[in-house]
């Protein structure tokens, strides 16, 4: 016995009335899959060819000032790098420490700007690099800077490490929307590009050490 089920307009309407969600789900899966493939396969600069600044201080604009500053640093101090980037991070009490621990474990970011308490926690756990060898070699000039609160005891060796620089000694950063009170700059110990991160830090100390006068237009106006 043959059963005929001809396709009619009414049957098509009924099908889509009750099964529309299947097509919607397939569309969502397709978009997600395309994004996943694009993310996994797109080219990403290797760690030794990029320097990233993870900024957890006060941001006075939408980040455009800091991005312009990084572009300037890229051209003047780090022309051999493929990327010199900036990422603003929210330092909320609930997820801030968890985020920082995850990034540190994964080696994400190179230069960090963190509130004093979080800087001391990170540095005290051994996740921030000792800057003293770069000071001794002359790669980093910290003459005249009060570093009293920048030393921590490295947990494995018990040695005193110089792990940070108070960001308020670089008042010129405010012209780029970056406010440095109670914020410390430090370098992730496993960021993967130590020497170039020190170059960026040294460039910031040298080129942004003077505040911008009130009657002088900032290099990049706040949005």
Image (cartoon, rainbow, N blue to C red):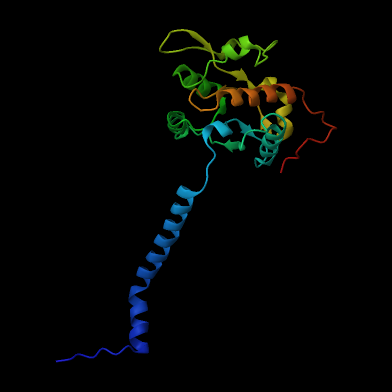
Q: Quadrant of residue 211?
A: top right
Q: Is 19 situated above or below 56?
A: below
Q: Quadrant of residue 71?
A: top right
Q: Quadrant of the C terminus?
A: top right
Measured from the top left, where is residue 34 in percent x and y? Answer: 45, 57
Query: Residue at 20% of width from left, 90% of height from top?
Result: 3
Question: Which of the pair 26/81 is nearer the observer?
Answer: 81
Q: Is 21 situated above or below 109?
A: below
Left/right of residue 7 with respect to residue 143 in the rendered view? left
- Residue 181 visible in this rendered orientation of the protein: no
Query: Residue at 45% of width from left, 48% of height from top?
Result: 40
Measured from the top left, where is residue 155 in percent x and y? Answer: 42, 13
Measured from the top left, where is residue 67 in percent x and y? Answer: 66, 39
Query: Residue at 60% of width from left, 30% of height from top?
Result: 57
Question: Which of the pair 41/116 is nearer the observer?
Answer: 41
- Residue 157 visible in this rendered orientation of the protein: yes
Q: Is 215 situated above or below 145?
A: below
Question: Which of the pair 187/97 is nearer the observer?
Answer: 187
Outermost left residue? 1
Left/right of residue 22 with respect to residue 223 in the rendered view? left
Left/right of residue 27 with respect to residue 215 in the rendered view? left
Outermost right residue? 215
Outermost front residue? 80
Give the total of numbered labels.
0
Query: Residue at 64% of width from left, 24% of height from top?
Result: 199
């Amino acid at each position: 016995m043959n059963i005929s089920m001809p396709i009619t307009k009414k049957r098509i309407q009924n099908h889509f009335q009750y099964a529309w969600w299947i097509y919607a789900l397939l569309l969502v899966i397709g978009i997600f899959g395309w994004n996943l493939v694009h993310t996994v396969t797109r080219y990403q600069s290797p760690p030794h060819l990029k320097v990233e600044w993870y900024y957890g201080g006060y941001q006075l604009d939408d980040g455009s000032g800091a991005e312009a500053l990084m572009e300037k640093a890229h051209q003047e101090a780090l022309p051999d790098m493929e990327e010199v980037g900036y990422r603003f991070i929210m330092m909320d009490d609930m997820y801030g420490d968890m985020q920082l621990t995850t990034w540190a474990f994964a080696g994400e970011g190179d230069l960090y700007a963190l509130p004093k308490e979080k800087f001391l926690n990170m540095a005290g756990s051994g996740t921030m690099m000792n800057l003293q060898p770069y000071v001794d070699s002359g790669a980093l000039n910290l003459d005249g800077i009060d570093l009293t609160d920048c030393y921590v005891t490295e947990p494995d060796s018990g040695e005193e490490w110089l792990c940070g620089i108070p960001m308020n000694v670089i008042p010129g950063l405010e012209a780029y929307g970056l406010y440095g009170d109670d914020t410390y700059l430090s370098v992730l110990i496993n960021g993967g590009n130590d020497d170039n991160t020190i170059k960026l830090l040294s460039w910031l100390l040298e080129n942004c050490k003077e505040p911008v006068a009130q009657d002088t237009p900032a290099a990049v106006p706040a949005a």
